[in-house]
């Protein structure tokens, strides 16, 4: 095993180093844009698109993403780029900035020029990074923030300056403005700061700086929460703590959120545990990894009963909860592996990334469906009941303001109710849900629209309450065809 020591002195970053990092970032961004997916990763993407489109820039959990996305879409609109493509490009840009920061952090830590580029390439090629950089989501922008925090943090590791601890805490607090994982990022960097150079540097020498980093983070993150009204981050954390820990779900999370999402770089970084002179860094990384898997299991385990309701079709986040670990795993791997092994690892990581992105992507939206929606909207606002997120995406990509309801939400609610008390789950209950949705849409002056694919999904349901409801809708509502193009056939409902 070949190991390259990080230089003890703080390596100076020159203008040329910044230029090289910018070139690496530009290459990474081009790759991410080329991989741009039609997939909607989750429901948040629909809501982000709607809020940006309507200029509703306050979010109870994230302070900075929506204003940034709104400004970015306005700039891109000057080049006739739609909001969806603009926000997807913002993800690519955020991840690319993170790649550049990894390269500069490696430079600060004293790696050779070639290994700095290798570290950046390793970070860029991570399947989880490539996935998040090619969809509309906040995760890739958060990855950029997490990697940016390594700029002052790498100085803290090499110089132990108090100012570097304060700057790092500031960076992690800013990251919380994009994602609640910024709090975990602060804890992660505290742990790394404490034992990165252990046993060469005693814990008592490192702990005060780590404590200052955490205190700075807490103070500024609290200030941001009060200033921007993002108090729900604390509520989410409290709710997560209250969830039971599903021990049987750990293998699923470890496989999908770490092994597949970060293969093979993430696993290679664990080999630092075998490097005795640098065992502190490896131990810190392993502890942080266990912490992230623990938190991910708590969150995803709570969602396991909503499997049919999720756009991905399974309880997976494709490694997005662990994105803050992308920088250390790339840096540790670049320092540890021989050059040839590093090149093989990067090539394998890039191949896994492309395969995973392409295998989960959706096909292009049917042009006929887009035209049909345009015709339907000429009659006035619509609120559609659709079969799945893919059908909703056909509408939302061009008309983000349209609020959609999914068949999966009905199936999930019915399944949850049946688990608690099977006697209350009847066909009439499903029809009552439809009536409430219909009344809400009509009161807002919108047409309540049902797609043929959603009706087919109800009829094909094995649930004894849902399938009959699809047929009884014909007795209670008039169905007026308003769209019939390609795969999209939709009816406006009017109560008889």
Image: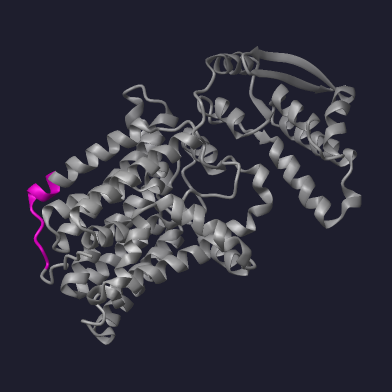
Part of the protein shown in magenta: 10-19
Q: Does residue 204 appear left or right of residue 86 in this picture?
A: left
- Residue that appears at 21% across and 81% down: 200
Q: Position of residue 178 (x, y in %)?
A: 41, 52
Queried whether the magenta region covers residue 15, the answer comes back as yes
Q: Position of residue 38 (x, y in %)?
A: 48, 31
Quadrant position of the C terminus in the picture: top right
Queried whether the magenta region covers residue 11, the answer comes back as yes
Vertical order, 437 against 15 (above or below): above
- Residue that appears at 58% across and 31% down: 390
Foreground pick, 356 / 344: 344
Q: Position of residue 35 (x, y in %)?
A: 38, 33
Quadrant position of the N terminus in the picture: bottom left
Vertical order, 287 against 355 (above or below): below
Q: Quadrant of residue 437?
A: top right
Foreground pick, 457 / 335: 335
Q: How is the image coloured?
A: one colour
């Amino acid at each position: 095993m070949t190991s390259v020591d990080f230089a003890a002195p703080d390596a100076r970053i020159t203008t040329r180093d910044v230029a090289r990092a910018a070139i690496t970032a530009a290459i990474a961004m081009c790759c991410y844009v080329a991989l741009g997916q039609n997939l909607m990763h989750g429901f948040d993407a629909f809501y982000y698109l709607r809020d940006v489109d309507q200029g509703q820039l306050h979010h109870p959990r994230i302070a900075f993403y929506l204003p940034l996305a709104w400004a970015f879409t306005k700039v891109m609109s000057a080049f006739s780029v739609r909001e969806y493509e603009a926000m997807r490009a913002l993800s690519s840009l955020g991840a690319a900035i993170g790649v550049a920061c990894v390269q500069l952090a490696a430079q600060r830590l004293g790696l050779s020029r070639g290994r700095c580029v290798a570290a950046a390439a390793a970070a860029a090629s991570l399947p989880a990074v490539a996935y998040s950089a090619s969809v509309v989501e906040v995760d890739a922008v958060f990855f950029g923030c997490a990697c940016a925090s390594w700029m002052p943090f790498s100085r803290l590791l090499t110089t132990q300056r108090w100012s570097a601890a304060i700057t790092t805490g500031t960076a992690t607090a800013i990251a919380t403005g994009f994602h609640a994982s910024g709090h975990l990022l602060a804890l992660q960097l505290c742990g790394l700061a404490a034992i990165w150079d252990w046993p060469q540097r005693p814990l008592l020498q490192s702990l005060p700086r780590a404590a200052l980093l955490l205190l700075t983070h807490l103070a500024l993150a609290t200030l941001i929460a009060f200033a921007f009204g993002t108090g729900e981050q604390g509520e989410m954390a409290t709710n997560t703590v209250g969830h039971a820990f599903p021990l049987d779900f750990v293998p699923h999370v470890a496989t999908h959120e770490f092994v597949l999402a970060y293969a093979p770089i993430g696993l290679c970084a664990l080999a630092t545990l075998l490097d005795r002179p640098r065992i502190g860094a490896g131990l810190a990384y392993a502890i942080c990894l266990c912490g992230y898997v623990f938190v991910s299991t708590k969150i995803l385990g709570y969602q396991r009963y909503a499997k049919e309701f999720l756009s991905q079709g399974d309880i997976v986040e494709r490694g997005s909860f662990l994105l803050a670990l992308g920088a250390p795993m790339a840096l540790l791997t670049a320092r540890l592996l021989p050059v040839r092994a590093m090149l093989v690892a990067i090539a394998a990581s890039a191949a896994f990334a492309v395969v995973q992105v392409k295998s989960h992507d959706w096909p292009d939206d049917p042009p006929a469906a887009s035209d049909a929606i345009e015709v339907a909207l000429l009659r006035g606002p619509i609120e559609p009941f659709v079969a799945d997120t893919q059908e909703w995406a056909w509408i939302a990509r061009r008309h983000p303001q349209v609020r959609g309801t999914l068949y999966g939400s009905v199936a999930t609610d019915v399944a949850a109710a049946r688990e608690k008390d099977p006697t209350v789950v009847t066909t009439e209950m499903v029809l009552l849900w439809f009536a409430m949705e219909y009344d809400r849409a009509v009161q807002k002056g919108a047409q309540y629209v049902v797609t043929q694919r959603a009706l087919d999904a109800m009829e094909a349901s094995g649930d004894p309450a849902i399938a009959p409801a699809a047929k009884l809708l014909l007795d209670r509502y008039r169905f007026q065809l308003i769209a019939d193009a390609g795969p999209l056939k939709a009816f406006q409902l009017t109560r008889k």
